[in-house]
Image (spheres, rainbow, N blue to C red):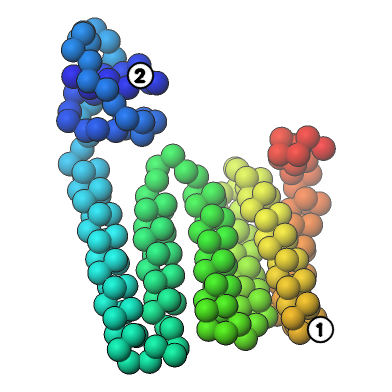
C-alpha cells in the first residue's frame, strides 16, 4: 500500500501522488488498516487528468505544425510564436481553473495577470506597436473592475474579499499608464480611463465598506 509521509495517510488505489498535498507517495509494506485511508480517486478525476494530458499533447502538435507552416511560407513574420503563446495560455487556463484548492477570485486575478503578460508579449513579438498598453490591457482591466463589482453585489456576505483584487487592478492600471506614457510621451486615453475607474472602484469599496473594508485591509497589510 502506498503512503504519504507528509499527510500520514495510506492510499488504497494505485496513484503515485497524494491527492491531498500532491507529494510523491512511498510504498509501505507495514501500513495497517486502522490508520486513516484515503478513498479511491474517482473516475471523473482520472478522466480529467487524461483530458489535460491530451490537451497538452494536442497543443504541442498544433504548435509544431504552425511552426512548420510558418517556416515554409512567411518566416519573415513569425506568427507561429503568437500561436504558441496562445496555446500555452489556453493550457494554463484549463489546468488552473479546475484546481479545487484555489478560490475563484484568486483564479481570476492570476489568469488576468498572465493574460496581460501574454498580450504584452504578443505585442513585442509583432514588433511592439504599443497597442497592448494603450488599448488592450486597459480594456481588460476595466472589464475586470466591472466584473469584481458584479461579484461584490452577488456575494454580499463576503464582498470584502474582492478588495485585494481591486488593489491589484489599481497597480496594473498604473503600470500600464506609465509604460504607455514612456512610449508615447502623452497620456493615452484608455490607460487614463482604466486607472480612474480602478481608483474609483477601490475608493467606493473602502469608503462605503466601513468596518468590514477596514478589517480586510488590516488583515492584509496590518494598517
Q: Position of residue 24 (x, y in %)?
A: 32, 30
Q: CA distance from mark 2 to mark 1?
A: 58 Å
Which quadrant, please, contains the N terminus? top left
Name the residue at 29% across, 67% down. Answer: 59
Which quadrant, please, contains the C terminus? top right
Name the residue at 71% across, 39% down. Answer: 220
Q: Up-down: is 36 above or below 98?
A: above
**Horizontal arrangement in the rendering, residue 162 relative to residue 204 (left or right):** left
Q: Is residue 90 visible?
A: yes
Q: Nearer the viewer, residue 56 or 198?
A: 56
**Horizontal arrangement in the rendering, residue 37 relative to residue 20 (left or right):** left
Other residues around mark 2 within 10 Å, as few (<14) / some (14–19) / many (≥20): some
Q: Up-down: is 160 above or below 65?
A: above
Q: Residue 65 appears in which quarter of the rendering?
A: bottom left
Numbered badge on residue 5:
2
Q: Which residue is mark 1?
A: 185
Name the residue at 45% across, 88% down. Answer: 77
Q: Position of residue 207 (x, y in %)?
A: 81, 51
Amino acid at each position: 500500500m502506498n503512503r504519504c509521509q507528509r499527510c500520514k495517510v495510506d492510499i488504497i488505489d494505485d496513484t503515485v501522488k497524494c491527492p491531498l498535498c500532491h507529494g510523491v507517495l512511498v510504498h509501505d509494506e507495514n501500513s495497517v488498516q486502522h490508520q486513516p485511508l484515503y478513498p479511491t480517486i474517482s473516475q471523473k478525476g482520472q478522466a480529467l487528468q487524461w483530458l489535460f494530458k491530451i490537451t497538452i499533447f494536442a497543443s504541442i502538435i498544433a504548435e509544431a505544425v504552425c511552426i512548420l507552416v510558418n517556416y515554409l511560407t512567411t518566416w519573415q513574420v513569425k506568427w507561429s510564436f503568437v500561436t504558441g503563446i496562445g496555446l500555452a495560455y489556453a493550457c494554463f487556463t484549463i489546468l488552473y481553473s479546475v484546481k479545487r484548492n484555489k478560490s475563484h477570485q484568486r483564479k481570476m486575478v492570476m489568469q488576468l495577470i498572465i493574460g496581460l503578460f501574454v498580450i504584452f508579449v504578443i505585442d513585442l513579438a509583432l514588433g511592439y506597436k504599443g497597442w497592448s498598453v494603450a488599448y488592450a490591457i486597459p480594456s481588460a482591466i476595466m472589464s475586470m473592475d466591472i466584473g469584481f463589482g458584479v461579484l461584490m453585489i452577488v456575494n454580499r456576505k463576503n464582498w470584502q474579499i474582492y478588495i485585494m483584487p481591486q488593489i491589484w487592478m489599481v497597480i496594473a492600471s498604473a503600470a500600464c499608464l506609465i509604460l504607455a506614457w514612456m512610449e508615447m510621451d502623452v497620456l493615452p486615453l484608455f490607460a487614463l480611463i482604466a486607472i480612474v475607474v480602478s481608483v474609483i472602484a477601490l475608493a467606493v469599496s473602502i469608503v462605503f465598506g466601513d468596518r468590514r473594508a477596514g478589517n480586510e485591509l488590516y488583515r492584509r497589510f496590518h494598517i
